[in-house]
Image (spheres, helix red, strand yellow):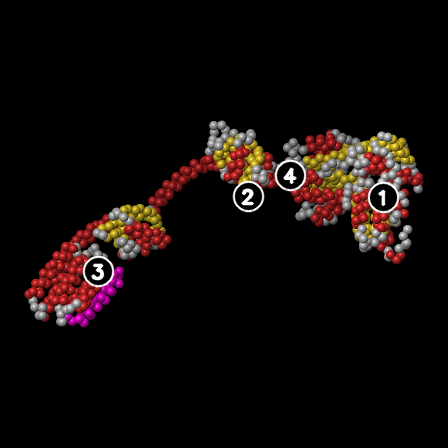
């Protein structure tokens, strides 16, 4: 999906779906962006990583979208991981709303992907 | 019997003799069948009869080739046979035999009276001999055997002598006739009933190359009638022979063959002649080669005179026609062709009105152009002309119409109406028809071209931004002026792309391909550029990617020049990449200058060129101008002159963007239209005030604009990057609430105002709705963000609307952590 504000780039790395967001995420694009991500995750996938490194702006509607995405993914026994480099407006917002309670937030993409792709056996108990 | 009547030729004589021999032999045999005297020697008579039959058969078969001396021999043989027959048969039997044979002979050769007289004389002579002599005497028998034929022959030869005299007279007259005929300049030929040549004069010898001897007894087909005309000749001859009436003359022109095989035209005058029951065909033949040649010469002369007159007439016609054809070729635009054409038709035909009707796809006709106006019955008449597909005169020759065809289809109809009291002539019709043949295709081409041009232009316009984005603090204006219809639609395009982070991308490009192909390439480049720009690539990478697109996907060697400029109002800078495009122009403090920086090759020229970014300041109050070469390139003028002129025009132009562009188009584009497309895009970086109040529509789409405006204002107020991000996040939450309160689609608006006192910033967002602490699905996170990110958040839920005031003092980063 390419809008004037945001671009959504989806890539499947084995059992992990990587969604790279760039541009600005506000209420005008939040809902369709969330749907686009949810649709991109096949039931066979182990989880999804939303890479927000390219995102210049995100407001509370973007946060709401991420929360609801976390719920949806969780209901399919899949994982949601977020990548947000520190010192950027987006990571500040995620900190403020304590999004870490809903899903793990990583500082770089590779760590996040490795985390999702790690063997199930070493998965910590939920919660 | 040496002299035979000249009337009979050898062939006739031979056949006559054959009859006589056969008849004599038959009579001799008949005497044996009937009762007869004992002394008759049957075997001798049978042998004689057989001999006579054989001679008759030979001479009959050889009749065509028999010679005269051979006839004499045969006659001699006949006399011998009869003498022997007399001897062996004896007088009583012989008498009737000889009598009958002689009778036949006489009746065959002589008129009735003479034949009767001769037979009577013979009868008396035999009677006397038989009465006086005893038939048993050997002397008498020999006398009778030899004497009777001798007497008969003598008598006959006397009679024949008289006949011969007559024949000589005839022959002399014939000879005279022949001399006359030989002296005749024309060939004279006679044919008998069967078509065999019986006369062939010396003129005939000269004319056909065959001698009389060779010709006689042959047919005309054998000698002088060409093979392919043989049947016709025969038909004609038979018809003539069968024709009624004793005398008829027919003349006809036919071709003849000379002995050498050469052909010549002849004139034959033939008649059917009947003399004494014989039917002849006689004819005079003359070589008319010379006559035909003179006749041809005369005709050629007449033709030449006529041709000269025709040529003069045609010169007038062609002159008029050329004027019409020129009209079609002098212009490329359809309207111009049609206007010029009808004006010239009116002039050339000296007509009152001239109109061209164009056929549409449904087959209807619409007026394309008229001079000075339509004839009242013109369209009706034009429809008739279109249906008939023929140049037509109508309404008492006061209307002339001609269809214009292209590939067999009527594409237009040209109609002229006469001045009062004047009518059109066939000449006018011809002129119009000839002109139409030549003009039709030109008009058809112009129409196809025009249609494609229109499609391309529509496509192109659809690719240009319909409305430039509302950019706070930045004023943009653009113009796109397609080339006058004579030229192809160009591939000029411009675009204004808001980029995340408050910057704005300005694009000005020119695809070298014209027409539909160029326009569709523009479409691809435009959407690709928007996508790349949004993905956050820097300007150089964006342009490199576009180059890849053009290099790998465009047909042939499609090329494009392009400027991609990123204006960052917050930093008061421009960064740009120039791919072979004329340089952008900056107006700062009234000074006009071109932005000279890294210039690189146009797109589509190299597979992997490097496009480097150049940065320059763009202070508030300055303007930037982007344009395509159509504005500065004029035929025969150096590009530098065009650029210098542009700079001069910009310097004298008003400051505001719309005024600037209008001034440039007014002074730099010729009044008859631009030769090439012209695209212009200008951006004015407005001065940043300390306080502001801006109204926005209560729509989610306005949020990006609010953020962009605030970024610029905050940057100008001295906020660092993180402060800007945090403040606009907080303000964004407040603005989102304002939009939610208003509800969408009801034309409601909200206001953003700002002020600063030193480093203290206050931003207020005021809407016209009722305050709700929480948005749906928000769980109070909006308010939480505002409170965390700002020093102070005040909410004033008044009856007429809610105002959220956000305050923060810059330079206190540790505050929230």
Residue topped by disc 4:
B454
Bounds of the magenta segment: B40-66
Magenta segment's dominant SS is: helix
Distance CA(mark 4)–CA(mark 3): 103 Å
Distance CA(mark 4)–CA(mark 1): 49 Å
Distance CA(mark 1)–CA(mark 3): 142 Å
Distance CA(mark 2)–CA(mark 3): 81 Å
The chain that hosts pointer 3 is B
Judge from the rendering whether residue B557 lies leftward or rightward of residue B430; answer left or right: right
Q: Please tell me how crowded label 2 is: few (under 14), some (14-19), or many (20+) other residues with Cα within 10 Å.
A: few
* Quarter placement of the N terminus of chain B: bottom left
Compare residues B470 and B178 and report the one nearer the observer. B470
User: SS at mark 3?
Assistant: helix
Residue A94: % across, % down: 88, 44
Residue topped by disc 1:
A64
* Quarter placement of the C terminus of chain B: top right
Compare residues B371 and B602 and report the one nearer the observer. B371
Residue topped by disc 2:
B407
Residue B772: % across, % down: 87, 36
Residue topped by disc 3:
B16
Judge from the rendering whether residue B761 lies leftward or rightward of residue B550; answer left or right: right
User: SS at mark 2?
Assistant: loop
Residue B693: % across, % down: 83, 31
């Amino acid at each position: 999906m390419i809008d004037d504000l945001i671009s959504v780039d989806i890539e499947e790395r084995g059992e992990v779906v990587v969604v790279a967001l760039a541009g600005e995420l506000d209420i005008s694009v939040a809902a369709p962006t969330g749907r686009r991500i949810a649709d991109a995750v096949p039931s066979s996938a182990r989880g999804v990583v939303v890479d927000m490194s390219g995102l210049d702006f995100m407001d509370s509607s973007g946060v709401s979208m991420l929360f609801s995405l976390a719920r949806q993914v969780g209901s399919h026994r899949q994982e949601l991981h977020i990548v947000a480099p520190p010192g950027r407006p987006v990571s500040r917002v995620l900190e403020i709303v304590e999004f870490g309670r809903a899903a793990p937030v990583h500082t770089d993409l590779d760590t996040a992907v490795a985390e999702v792709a790690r063997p199930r056996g070493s998965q910590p108990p939920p919660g | 019997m040496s002299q035979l009547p000249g009337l009979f030729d050898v062939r006739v004589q031979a056949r006559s003799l054959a009859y006589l021999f056969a008849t004599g032999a038959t009579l001799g045999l008949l005497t044996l069948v009937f009762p007869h005297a004992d002394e008759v020697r049957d075997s001798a008579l049978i042998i004689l009869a057989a001999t006579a039959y054989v001679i008759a058969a030979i001479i009959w078969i050889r009749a065509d080739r028999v010679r005269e001396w051979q006839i004499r021999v045969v006659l001699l043989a006949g006399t011998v046979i009869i003498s022997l027959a007399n001897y062996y048969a004896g007088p009583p039997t012989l008498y009737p035999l000889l009598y009958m044979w002689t009778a036949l002979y006489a009746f065959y050769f002589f008129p009735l009276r003479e034949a009767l007289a001769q037979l009577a004389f013979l009868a008396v002579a035999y009677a006397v001999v038989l009465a006086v002599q005893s038939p048993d005497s050997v002397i008498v028998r020999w006398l009778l055997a030899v004497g009777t034929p001798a007497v008969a022959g003598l008598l006959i030869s006397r009679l024949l002598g008289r006949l011969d005299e007559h024949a000589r007279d005839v022959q002399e007259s014939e000879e005279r006739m022949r001399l006359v005929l030989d002296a005749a300049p024309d060939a004279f030929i006679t044919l008998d009933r069967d078509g065999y040549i019986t006369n062939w004069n010396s003129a005939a010898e000269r004319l056909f190359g065959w001698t009389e001897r060779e010709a006689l007894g042959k047919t005309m087909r054998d000698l002088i009638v060409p093979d392919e005309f043989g049947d016709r000749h025969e038909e004609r001859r038979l018809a003539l022979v069968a024709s009624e009436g004793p005398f008829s003359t027919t003349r006809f022109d036919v071709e003849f063959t000379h002995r050498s095989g050469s052909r010549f035209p002849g004139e034959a005058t033939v008649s059917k002649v009947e003399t004494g029951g014989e039917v002849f065909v006689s004819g005079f033949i003359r070589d008319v080669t010379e006559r035909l040649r003179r006749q041809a010469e005369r005709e050629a002369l007449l033709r030449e005179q006529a041709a000269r007159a025709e040529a003069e007439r045609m010169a007038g016609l062609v002159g008029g026609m050329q004027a019409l054809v020129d009209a079609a070729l002098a212009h490329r635009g359809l309207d111009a062709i049609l206007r010029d054409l009808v004006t010239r038709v009116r002039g050339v035909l000296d007509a009152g009105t001239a109109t061209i009707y164009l056929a549409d796809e449904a087959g209807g006709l619409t007026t394309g152009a008229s001079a000075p106006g339509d004839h009242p019955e013109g369209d009706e008449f034009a429809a008739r002309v279109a249906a008939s597909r023929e140049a037509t005169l109508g309404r008492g020759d006061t209307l002339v119409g001609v269809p214009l065809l292209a590939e067999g289809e009527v594409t237009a109809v040209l109609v002229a109406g006469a001045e009062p009291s004047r009518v059109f002539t066939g000449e006018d019709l011809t002129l119009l028809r000839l002109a139409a043949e030549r003009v039709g295709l030109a008009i058809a081409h112009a129409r196809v071209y025009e249609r494609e041009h229109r499609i391309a232009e529509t496509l192109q316009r659809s690719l240009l931004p319909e409305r430039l984005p509302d950019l706070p603090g930045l004023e943009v204006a653009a113009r796109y002026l397609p080339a006058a219809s004579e030229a192809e639609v160009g591939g000029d395009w411009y675009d204004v792309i808001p980029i995340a982070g408050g910057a704005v991308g300005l694009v000005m490009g020119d695809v070298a391909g014209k027409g539909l192909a160029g326009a569709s390439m523009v479409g691809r480049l435009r959407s690709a550029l928007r996508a790349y720009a949004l993905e956050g690539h820097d300007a150089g990478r964006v342009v490199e990617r576009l180059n890849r697109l053009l290099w790998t996907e465009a047909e042939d060697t499609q090329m494009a020049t392009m400027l991609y400029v990123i204006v960052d109002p917050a930093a008061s800078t421009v960064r740009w990449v120039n791919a072979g495009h004329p340089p952008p122009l900056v107006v700062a403090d009234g000074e006009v200058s071109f932005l000279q920086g890294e210039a690189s090759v146009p797109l589509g020229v190299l597979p992997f060129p490097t496009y480097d970014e150049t940065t320059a300041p763009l202070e508030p109050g300055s303007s930037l101008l982007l344009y395509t070469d159509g504005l500065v390139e004029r035929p025969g003028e150096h590009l530098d002159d065009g650029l210098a002129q542009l700079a001069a025009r910009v310097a004298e132009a008003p400051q505001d963007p719309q005024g600037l562009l209008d001034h440039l188009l007014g002074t730099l584009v010729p009044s008859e239209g631009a030769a090439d497309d012209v695209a212009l895009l200008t951006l004015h970086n407005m001065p940043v005030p300390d306080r502001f109040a801006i109204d926005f529509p209560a729509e989610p789409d306005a949020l990006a604009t609010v953020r962009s405006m605030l970024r610029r204002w905050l940057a100008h107020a001295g906020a660092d990057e993180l402060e800007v991000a945090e403040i606009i996040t907080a303000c964004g939450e407040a603005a989102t609430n304002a939009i939610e309160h208003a509800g969408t689609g009801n034309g409601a608006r909200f206001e953003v105002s700002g002020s600063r006192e030193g480093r203290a910033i206050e931003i207020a967002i005021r809407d016209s709705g009722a305050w709700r602490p929480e948005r749906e699905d928000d769980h109070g996170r909006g308010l939480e963000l505002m409170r965390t990110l700002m020093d102070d958040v005040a909410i004033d839920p008044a009856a007429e609307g809610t105002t959220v005031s956000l305050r923060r003092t810059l330079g206190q980063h540790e505050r929230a952590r």
